[in-house]
Image (cartoon, rainbow, N blue to C red):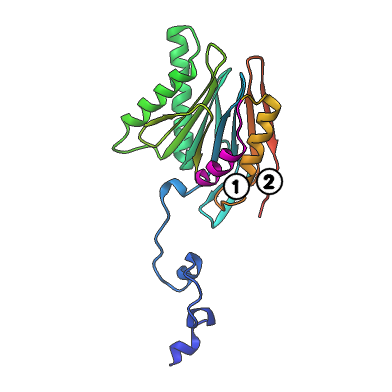
């Protein structure tokens, strides 16, 4: 009886099975998957002779703590190709450094830049090579090939490639991104329409995911230039 009286009210009445409350009550709490540990939202989309890629900038530990809102998740590989890396923050850094190394080695040997299709094949090979102790990251490749046609592909963490001519998504906000992208994407968008669509899709999706958000960045790749714009998102 004494124990029951001294217990907090929310434990006596059995208020919801929230992980924080369960931890306070001394109960064991199952940790979410390692791919959701840091959270991310990445989407790439094709337009008419242009391609765009966008990501959120939150860096946090699950839903419990946000440590920064300037996290880099998109990396420029060539003048017309970007790679987005979703997943565990440490493996994102490792993969980006390994990719940079492979890119420079290729350029020294071949005396030319990698095409986005080749970058996709390199990433697939790198991930499959470590399939028994994988990098916990799910990359996205977006770029223009030598004919100035958009190229988009995404991977799982053991290197299975999935190509699409419209859009690809990755990260903890994937389900939300699929919904808004299927609604908003349309063919033959110019670079301004593509930016607006990407920005609205990203902001709408991360508003429904507590593991991503806190701002974003959008890169639009055209044959002549790369346009980079930062988005201000909700920070609550």
Report if the CB atoms under discs 2 and 1 are less than 8 Å apart.
Answer: yes
- Asked if residue 213 can be seen in this view, the reply is no
Query: Magenta span: helix, strand or loop, mainly?
Result: helix
Which quadrant, please, contains the N terminus?
Answer: bottom left
Disc marking residue 233: 2
Residue 119 point in image, percent of width and height: 45, 21
Residue shown at 46% from the left, 43% from the top: 88
Q: Nearer the viewer, residue 17 or 111?
A: 17
Is label 1 in a helix, a strand or a loop?
A: helix
- Asked if residue 211 can be seen in this view, the reply is yes
Is label 2 in a helix, a strand or a loop?
A: loop
Relative to residue 126, is residue 101 drawn left or right?
Answer: right
**How packed is label 1: few (under 14 Cα within 10 Å), some, or many (20 or more)?**
many
178 vs 164: above or below:
below
Which residue, as the protein is rendered here, is positioned at the far bottom?
1
Residue shown at 47% from the left, 65% from the top: 19
Residue 100 point in image, percent of width and height: 48, 23
Residue 103 point in image, percent of width and height: 47, 18
Residue 236 point in image, percent of width and height: 66, 55
Give, as a single range, the part of the protein colored magenta. 173-187
212 vs 152: above or below:
below
Residue shown at 69% from the left, 29% from the top: 193
Which residue is labeled 1 in the image?
Answer: 206
């Amino acid at each position: 009886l004494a124990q029951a009286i001294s217990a907090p009210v929310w434990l006596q009445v059995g208020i919801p099975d929230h992980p924080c409350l369960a931890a306070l009550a001394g109960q064991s709490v199952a940790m979410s998957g390692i791919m959701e540990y840091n959270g991310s939202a990445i989407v790439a989309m094709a337009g008419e002779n242009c391609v765009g890629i966008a990501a959120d900038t939150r860096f946090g530990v699950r839903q419990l703590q946000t440590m920064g809102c300037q996290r880099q998740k998109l990396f420029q590989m060539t003048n017309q190709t970007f790679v987005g890396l979703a997943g565990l923050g440490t493996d994102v850094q490792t993969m980006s450094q390994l990719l940079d190394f492979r890119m420079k080695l290729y350029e020294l040997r071949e005396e030319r830049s990698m095409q986005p299709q080749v970058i996709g094949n390199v990433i697939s090979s790198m991930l499959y090579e470590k399939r028994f102790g994988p990098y916990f990251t799910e990359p996205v490749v977006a770029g223009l090939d030598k004919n100035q046609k958009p190229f988009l592909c995404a991977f799982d963490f053991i290197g299975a490639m999935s190509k699409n001519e419209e859009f690809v998504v990755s990260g903890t906000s994937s389900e939300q991104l699929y919904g808004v992208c299927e609604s908003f994407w349309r063919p033959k968008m110019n670079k301004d329409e593509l930016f607006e669509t990407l920005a609205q899709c990203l902001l709408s999706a991360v508003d429904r995911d507590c593991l991503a958000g806190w701002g974003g960045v959008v890169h639009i790749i055209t044959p002549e230039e790369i346009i980079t714009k930062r988005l201000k998102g909700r920070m609550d």
